[in-house]
Structure formats: C-alpha cells, structure tokens
Image: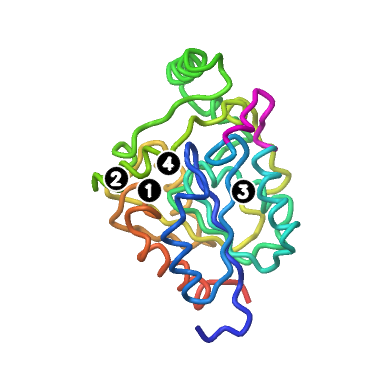
Amino acid sequence: MSHANPPPFLLVHGAYHGGWCWRDVARRLRTSGFDVFTPTQTGLGERRHLLSAHLTMETFVQDIVNVILAEELEDVILVAHSYGSRVCNGVVDRMPERVRHLVHLDGGFAFDNQSRLEGMTPEMREARIAKAMQHDGGISVTGPSAAEFGIADPDLAAWVDRRMTPQPFGPERTALVLNNPLGNGVPATYIACMAPQLAAVAKSAAYAKGRDDWTYIEIDAGHDAMVTHPAQVADILENIVHNGARS
C-alpha cells in the first residue's frame, strides 16, 4: 500500500453480533497495512457479562467514542453494520472532526430522533416487547438465525449462530437524540446488500440512495456481507481510502 500514514479503520457491529463478525474483513485490511479496531458493544459478544437493564443508546455511542479517545484515533474510516449505523450516526454527531469517512454496510437509521421501538408499527412493537419479556424479563431480546441474515453456507451459519448473543433491550427503548442533521456533514458511503435486501433496512437504504452528497453502492450479498463476502467488503473499504475519502 502506498499511503505513508493510512487511516485507521473502526468497524462497528450490528445487533446480536460482536467485534468477532469482522474477523475476515479485518484480516484483509491489516494485511494491506491498515490499523483496524473491532470493538464489541456493552452486553454483547465477549462482553455479554455486562448486560443490564440500565444500558441505553448512549451507552453504545460512548462505547465507540471511548475507543476513538483511548486509542487517540484521527482521520478514522468508521464502518457501521446494520444497527451499528444508529450508533455511528451518534458518534459523528458528537465528534465529526475525528471521522474521515462514514460507511454504512446495510445500515438502519433512526429517523426523527425515534427509538427503535418507536419506529415500529404498534403490532411489531408489542410483539418485540413480549419477546423480550418472555426471554429475561425485558433486559434483552433474542434475534434471528444466521440463515435469516442471508448466510447460506452451513459452516459459516454455524459459526455465526454459536457467537450471536441476545440484544440488550434498553437501547431499543431509548432514543438517540442527534443535535445535528443525520451524518453531520461527514462524507459517507452506503453499501446496500441486495441478495436479498433485508426489509428492516429498506427505508434507510432508500434514504441513502436519495442523498446527493453520499455514495450509494449495491452488492450481490446478503445482510451479513462482512461474513459471507469479506474480500468484496474489504475491497470497497480500501477503494474508499484511495478514491472516496475526504482530503
């Protein structure tokens, strides 16, 4: 790689996942000479022992903000998968000067400062609350299988299913209030996974496609593209560094 001081990558997972889901993408980026950080949010993955009823969306945002501060990261390529886009929109709302480019990988956004539950239909909201209450009294909620995330390969699906953990429910109940317009002026790219498209992110993908100041890309992959198509995802991310990032 020709960049003397390549920007660091900060890869943020979505619901039910952890930093583990970026394993193969991170490996490729590191081979190309980049520093890569793959934190796991509080209450998930290897940090599942920190699950509590007191977690909020602000907890998740602070998880990522603190990585940037503790590692003294500048000029960051911030990559968010799925639910992680809500989190990373909060990060760039608070510290846009640290982020060179924001990449949404099949991301889902919060609109009008709504919580995830508020963005659902009444029927969906009631069903999700009931599911969480049945699981552990409303502290967390179980999620889909790897197959439902578009992972057809049985070995990969088993690998993901073994690692996924219930999603903390507090962040779904709480809204993340943005003090600036969504994206806060940070250059952004949206990667839409279209094989198939996940219904839960369709509205966000359409929003991204309609923004003239963002780059919009469609790929022939399922929702967990960082697991099933790591080389393609890594290539897109490297291309952003070479051709699509802010100078």
Residue ID for mark 4 = 201
Q: Residue at the location (42% across, 47% down)?
A: 206
Q: Is residue 161 left or right of residue 210?
A: left
Mark seen at residue 224:
1
Magenta residue span: 48-58
Q: Nearer the viewer, mark 3 or mark 1?
A: 1
| Front: mark 1 or 4 | 1
Q: Which numbered tag is attached to residue 65? A: none
Mark pair 1, 4: CA separation: 13 Å
Mark 4, Cα crowd under 10 Å, few <14 / some 14-19 / many 20+, is some
User: Which is more toward the observer, 120 or 61?
Assistant: 61
| Amino acid type, mark 2 | Ile
Query: From what the image shows, is residue 216 above or below residue 65?
Result: below
Callout 2 touching callout 1 (CB < 8 Å): yes
Residue type at the position of mark 1 = Asp
Separation of marks 4 and 3 at Cα, in angstroms: 15 Å
Query: Quick one: SS at disc 2?
Result: loop
Q: Is residue 88 left or right of residue 191?
A: right
Q: Badge 2 is on which residue?
A: 151
Identify the residue position indicated by label 3 in the image.
89
Query: 171 or 188, which is in the foreground?
Result: 171
Instruction: Compute the Cα span from label 3 to label 1.
Output: 20 Å
